[in-house]
Amino acid sequence: MQSVARLAGVSAMTVSRALKDSSSVAEATRDRILTVVREVGYVPDATARVFATRRSGFVAALVPSLDNSNFADTVRGMTERFDAAGLQMLIGDTEYSLEREEELVAAFLMRRPEAIVLTGGVHSDRTRRLLESADAPIVETWDLPARPLGDVVGFSNEAAGAAMVRHLHAVGRRRPGFVGGATNFDTRGAERRAGFKKAARALGLAADRVVLVGRPPVTMDQGAEALDAMLARWPVVDAIACVSDLSAFGVLAQCQRRGIDVPGRIAIAGFGDFDVARCCHPRLTTIAVDCAAIGRAAADAALGALAARKEGRRRRSATVEIPFRLVVRETA
Amino acid sequence: MQSVARLAGVSAMTVSRALKDSSSVAEATRDRILTVVREVGYVPDATARVFATRRSGFVAALVPSLDNSNFADTVRGMTERFDAAGLQMLIGDTEYSLEREEELVAAFLMRRPEAIVLTGGVHSDRTRRLLESADAPIVETWDLPARPLGDVVGFSNEAAGAAMVRHLHAVGRRRPGFVGGATNFDTRGAERRAGFKKAARALGLAADRVVLVGRPPVTMDQGAEALDAMLARWPVVDAIACVSDLSAFGVLAQCQRRGIDVPGRIAIAGFGDFDVARCCHPRLTTIAVDCAAIGRAAADAALGALAARKEGRRRRSATVEIPFRLVVRETA
DNA sequence: GCGGCCGATGGGATCGGTAACACGAGCCGA
DNA sequence: TCGGCTCGTGTTACCGATCCCATCGGCCGC
C-alpha cells in the first residue's frame, strides 16, 4: 500500500480511503490511485484490515457433511446472505462427530468469526464452553434444542419422525419399521427415530422394528442391507420409514432386486426430499424441508444480532421454526 | 496474551513459546502458563499470528459445486492432508461459473492463501492474471489443462468421454446419443462430450445425437427430460452416454416409467460412480475416478511446492494423472 | 477583512502476536 | 579459574492496514 501511495504521490491513508470509497477523496486523486492499483496489481491485505478494524469479516459455519444436498442447500442459502453482507464463510465439515465439531470450533475461534452457525443442538461440553465465552452471535440450525446457545432456526425432528408413521398408518399400514444410523452421532436422525417410536406406540403399533446400520451418514447401500436385515428379523413388515431419502432409495432398489412390490407389499417413506426421491421410479414419499430457507434465516438471525450489537441495542435470541411438510408420492 | 503473561508472572514472549510448544520453555513455567490459559479461557488470535509470521495458515480451494459427491470427496481428500499440515481450508463454490470463480479468487487472495487449488483448467483472463501475480503455488484438478498455471492433478475428460462410446460400441450399440449440459460452463462435461463425438466418428457412428439440457449441473430431473427429448428427435437411439451418473439415473428412471427396457432396448452409461449408480436397479455402468485421491494428490502437490519454497529449492510444476476406469454394471 | 467552517489530506499510534537478538545463570572442560 | 557453551527468558521492532486527530487551503458570511 505504501508503494501504491508513493506511485500515486499521496499518503497511504488516502489510498486506504480511495479503496474503501469513503467518498472523502477528490475524484481526480481517486482515479489516479485506482489506476496505479490496477497497474501494479495491488490486492489489499485482509489480515491487516482485520487487525486494524478488529472485524474479521468471517462467519463460521459447521455442517455434518458437505456431500448432502440438504446441508449443501443450507450452505448455499447462508452464502447468499453473508455474501451480500460482505462476510466470508469458513465452512467446516464435522463428519457427524461431536469431537470433530469441537476441534473445528476451537480452530475457527482463533480466526475470530463475527458469527457462528452450527448444525444441531447437541454439542460437547467443551464446545459449549468455548462458544459461550466467544464474543459472537451463535445460531443453531436443523433442530429445536432444549438449551439453545443463541438463536435457533430449525424444526422438530421428532415431529417429522412422528409424521412419517402417522402417514403410513393413515394409508393402512400396521406393521411399520424404521431404518436409521447408530445413535450418538446423527442426533437429528436419532430424534426422528424417537418420534417414530413414540407415535407408533401412540397409534397402538409395535415400535421395536428398528434396524440401525452404523455410523451416519447412512448410505444408499446401507439402506439396501437394512432391508435384508429388516425382513430377516421381521418378515411381516409392511412399511419402512427411513432416516433419509438416501437410505429409503437403497431400500427401494433392494426391494426391486428382490422382486418385492412397492408400495403393494412394502410402503417406503424417506426424509429430506432429495433429488433422487423426486426422480426415482416409483417416486418416494418423503418429508420436505426448505433447506435453503434454513440457511437464509440462520444468516439473517446472525446479521440481525450483529446489527443490534453495533447499534448497542439489546436483543433476545429468537427461534425461527421452518415448517416441514409431508410430500406424498408413489411409495407410500 | 499480555494478561495471561502477567497472571503467570512471565513475559508475553514466553507465553507465545509455551503455546507453540517450541520446547525452549522450562516445564514448570509451561505448566503454569497453560493453567492460566485454561483458567481464563484464552484463545490466541490467529490474525495476529498471521500478521507476525507472514503465513496465513489458509489454503483456498474452489469447486464447482459442494453438492456433488465427487467434489465433496475431493474436498475431503484435501482436508485430510491440509489438516495434518496445520492448514485451514477456505472453500469456495463457483457454481460452475467462471465469473463467480473470478470473484472468489479475488476475495480469497486478500486473505493471502498459502496455496490455491482450482477445479478445471479453464479460467477467465482476469482470474489467470490474478493467480499469476499471487505468490502462492497453484494446483488445477479434474482436468489436464493445455496451459497449466502450476501443478496439475487430473485426468483427460475427453478420454473418459471416448471410453464411454467405445464401450457402448463394444457391447453392440451402433446408435449412441449423449446427454449433457450447456457449453461454456461445465468445461469438463463439454470435454467429455467432445470425446464422445470424436470417438463416435472414429468408430464410424453418427455423432450428432446430443441433447443439451441447460446450465450445469445437470440434474436427475433434467436427465429424465433429456430422454424424452432424445427419443422424440432420434427414436432409433440404442444407447445413451451421460455427462454424469445423476443425469444417467434420470434417464434410467424415465425409461422405467415409459416401460422401456434397460439395457434391452436402451443401454445407459454415466460418469462419476456416484452412490446412486452403485445402488440403483439395474446398476449403472459408469466411469469411476478416485476423487479423494485427486484431493490428496492436489494437497500433496501444494505442500510439496511450499516445502520446496521454504528450503529455497527450485521445483518444476508437475502433472499427476489420476486414472479413471470403466465400471461395467448392468445398464450397458 | 477576518473568523470560522468545510473538504481533502497527512501523521502517528495502534491492533496482538512473533522473529531476532540480547542477556544472565549455571555448567563443563581445559 | 576462566572462557565458552547451553538453557531459559526478556526486549525491541515489526507485520499493513485503519482510527483519530491535526493541518492546510479556500470559500462563505458577516
Image: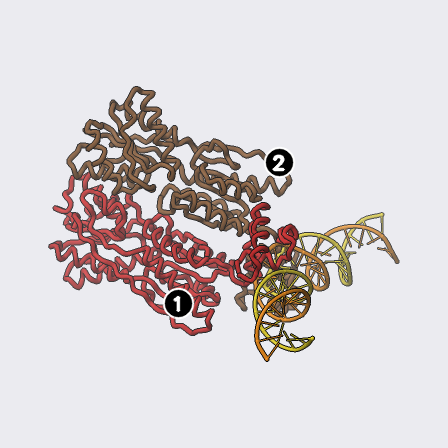
Chain colours: A red, B brown, C yellow, D orange
Measured from the top left, where is residue B184 in percent x and y?
38, 37
Q: Amino acid at mark 2?
A: Arg
> Could you tell whether B328 is left or right of D16 in the image?
left
> Could you tell whether C29 is left or right of A45 in the image?
right
Q: Is residue A320 above or below residue A266?
A: below
Residue sitting nearer the eye, B298 or C7: C7
Q: Is residue A202 above or below residue A4?
A: below
Note whether residue A323 is visible: yes
Q: Which residue is mark 2?
A: B314
Residue sitting nearer the eye, A11 or B37: A11
> Could you tell whether B141 is left or right of B133 in the image?
left
Q: Amino acid at mark 1?
A: Gly
Q: Which residue is mark 1?
A: A150
Measured from the top left, where is residue A123 in percent x and y?
40, 61
Q: Secondary structure at mark 2?
A: loop
x 55%, y 34%: residue: B317
